[in-house]
Amino acid sequence: MIGDGFPLLSTVILLPLLGAIAVGLSRNLHWAKVIAVAVAIIELLLTVMVRWAFDPANSGTFQLLERYAWIPSLNSEFLVGVDGISVLFLPMTALLTLMAISASWTAVQHLQRLHFALLLALEGITIGVFSALDTMLFFLFWELTLPPIFFLIGLWGIGPKRRGAAMKYTLFMLFGGVPLLFAFIILALNPAQAMDGAIPYGLCFNLETLLASPLPDNLQALVFLLLLLGFAVKAPLIPFHTWLPTAAMEGPAQLTALLMGLKLGIYGLLRFALPLAPSAALEYSWVLGILGAITLIYGGLIALQQSNLRRLLAYASISHVGLVIIGISSLTMQGIQGAILQLFNFALIASSLMLLAGFIQQRFASTEAIHLGGLAKTMPRLTCFYFLFVLASIGVPGTNGFPAELLLIIGALTAHPGLGIAALAGAVLGAAYMFAFTRRAFFGPITQSAVLHAQDLRPRELALLGVPALLVLAFGFFPEGVLDLNRGAAEAWLSHLLDQPSIDGGAMPAGEDAL
Amino acid sequence: MDALAVLIPLLPFIAAALIGVGQFSGILQGEASETVTATIANWAISMACLLALVLLGADWQGKNKGSLGLGHWLNSDTLDIPVNFITTGFNVVLAALFALLLVLILRFAVNYMHREAGFHRFFFIFSLFASAMLLLVLSGNAVGTFFGWEIAGVCSYLLIAYAYNRPIAAMNATRIFVTNRIGDAGFILGIGLSYSWGGSVSWQQLNAAQLSTGEATGIALSFMIAAFAKSAQLPFTPWLARAMEGPTPSSAAFYGAVMIHAGVFLVCLLAPVFEQAPFAMAILAVIGGATALYSFIVGLTQTDVKSSLVFATSGQLGLMFLACGLGYWQLAAWHLCAHAIVRCYQFLTAPSLMHNVLDNPIKPVTPAVTALRWAYIASLQRFWLDQITDWTLVRPIRRLAQDLSYFDDHVVDHIMGVPLSTISSLASLAQVKEQTLAARIDKDDSHFALGTGIAGKLTEWVAAIMHWFEDRFVLRGIGKDVLHYGRKLGHAANKFELLILRPRYLVLFVFITLLMVF
């Protein structure tokens, strides 16, 4: 059915959007839900097919390219494609959305159609972010993620300050969008100036062309810092992280799971910030590394202090982002492959833990440790899943967290030993904050009558958590499945950065010695 | 015969998976299915033991090739992590010995755990632990060993928290896991250094690699931290006493016979690297000797059976490390095997011993110690090691976390701007108009200078600041405001200085500087 000419990527971008419209328009609530799930399942199958159609042997080049005229006057196109870095995020997004939809099957009680429509729309837009190869198109999708998230937090949030949280999230993201736009415009102007083209027609937003024609050195630093600022807000890095704990406390669990599972910010750094300003990236990689180390330790220490599972997970997620950034800044194969693998892991681990927190919230109307205590006794299955995901999140062997963490730490140790040691300290902190909370919430005597009569996971919830749990174990034992896909891409990515024709005469690995 | 090495850790793992799935799905539940669980675990571990003995026999006959490779687990650039096993020498001896002891303990546990609430859970964790330990001793590369190392640690956590409704058990389990995590960090550091300096994570290649003295010392020290944490050497010794919360068979398996020896095993495995690092050998000997002495003195005042055994264990392990440090590797290896057997027996008989000596009070503490009051107190207090760790590490980090948490909520969040809730913001244009009109009335300093454009606005703001300064400070002289603001500023500065001079921050800064220099 699907030959070479079939526009697979456009289909996976548009299908959820059309599904969202269908869900929004359907009169019957039951049918709306069925449509939502059906679309999500078809989408998951299609994205798996994308992975199928993708050729791992050439993962360094963009594949499944589709090109349509979009804004001819600006020379901007609808150009989509995937390479070894982005290809796995498509099925992950689809899987996460399916999980989010089934997690909110009964949890959402008002405006259900709008809720499911927004989740589907967010899915399509996010897949657009992961596959856009035109900087304007990317920016469009990037900003389009805002409205669904704003309404999802504001309308179905579980905290009393959900409106404020939605506003806070939106303002942070709008703030982050400005430097991105600036950077993309500077980048687009460059080829035009280099070739003396007329301004609107000589503009270039095509990522491949931009990669092939690097900026002059004086502009690179500016573009790198602008992109870093823009993506740091979304990642989030210190000090732009405060929206995440707020969103985790106020927003609905299914949305926070998506926010913490899909790290668009780090993807942006990998895809745009470093490759588009290669010599600046080399020069300032230590800045990135130190930012990562600060984020890692700072997030970990604050997580140690949290008594609420959702807030704890938010800070743990911030801390993990720090580790990934350290890995990227090492500019070694291990660091990059570990970073991509860890991004893939987030989608499984962080989001599953967040959904699990959502289930606890549904039962006890709180995820505060003081309202729990002794959960292991009455909810053994939930506790099993919780343990598996916690062990994965602190990187215990046998789970997929371990190969990623090992690669990241080895990458960091070979590039900047100081950062490697900070990463190790972060690993110790990780065990401390996770198990300190476990001790208070899951162990100990039962003190609340609600906990005594709690119902363990229902079949729907079991199935929902079972899939990521199996994947966590599978990729823990066989990490090559993911690493094979991104090996070529990571090599191409690194050689683009490290083997650039050095203009200023061989001062290349300057970033290495700067620490 | 080499191929048997795969099955030895695999069989207990399959048993663990079966019991785990069975219990999770509710098939294995209650007293009725106790025999099923016990049979699965028993068969798997007994078979593993048999295979290990066969492997040992084959090794003595000289029929093993020495190693077995099974493809790759992970590959990234030049980092290549194989799945391989060592099928000769000390590793196989230990595998056979550990498997044998595990079978004995398992047999003991079947009756001992009868009708316990967590019967199935115990056997799940025990099988997983058996698999992890056998992998630990047989794996041919550092990552495989770490697999077993860390999973054994998790199993130890789960069994210490076996009676999880008791807060003390849960507390001790958490503390022990985090303490051991420091050792694990050392292990990972060792793996990283082996890769970047030795070029490989395979034990055999690492031992044969050409390392300078400095590199060998670095690698040896990293693995030594891991070994000290796992084998409860100074300064990690106190965790062992906390670990006695689990059921007796688990104490015997983890802290008497098997897991506690993993540290000595690791050091023995890396003997060629240690031989190249005289400094690391010296530290090994010093810490080993110090732990032996410490355990002896503290052990003198212990009056219950399990704590005496605990300190006897850590003391003997200290002696093994001392032997290693002095270069008597063979002696340490023999000591390890002999100690494992004796201690296994002692731990298993501990409950009956307690039962039997009920009317037979334990001998009072040696008079030689009671005479020296300070020594007696120090021994009773176990040299305050736990408290010292609390003061120097746990509490400062907690406080730092507290400070940072406050900083994050009250400073970063405010600087980044907490938007007003939409409830309190303006709803309609009419309200905006009203506010702009109303606001004018009661503002005493009406905007005299209103600028437009960037320059105009800048002038306006500068003028406003100058005006404020003139008004508050120059015209009113040293008024109330100056004193007020001055005092506030002073307080803030004082607070900041006090905070920054706290030892935890000083240490933090020193640490950060060291990392930078590194």
Image (spheres, coloured by chain):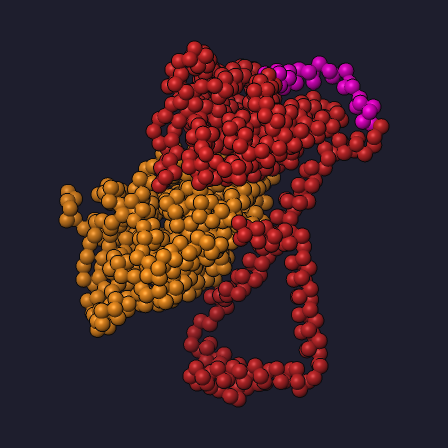
Chain colours: A orange, B red
**B339 w.r.t. A112: above or below:** above
> Which residue shows up at 32% across the image and 37% down it?
A481
Q: Quadrant of residue A106?
A: top left
Q: Nearer the viewer, residue A44 or A345?
A: A345
Most extreme residue toward the bottom, as rendered? B448
> Which residue shows up at 21% across the image and 52% down it?
A65
Q: Which residues are magenta?
A: B341-370
Asked if residue A165 lies left or right of residue B472, the reply is: left
Asked whether residue B184 is in view, the answer is no
**A93 w.r.t. B419: above or below:** above
Count of marks, rendered view? 0
Q: Nearer the viewer, residue B451 or A15?
A: B451
Quadrant position of the N terminus of chain B in the picture = top left
Asked whether residue A499 is in view, the answer is yes
Q: Magenta segment: does it hold B483?
A: no
> Which residue shows up at 42% across the image and 58% down it?
A284
Asked if residue B89 lies left or right of residue A69, the reply is: right
Residue A81 position in % (x across, y down) = 24, 52
Q: Main secondary structure of the magenta part?
A: helix
**A399 w.r.t. B456: above or below:** above
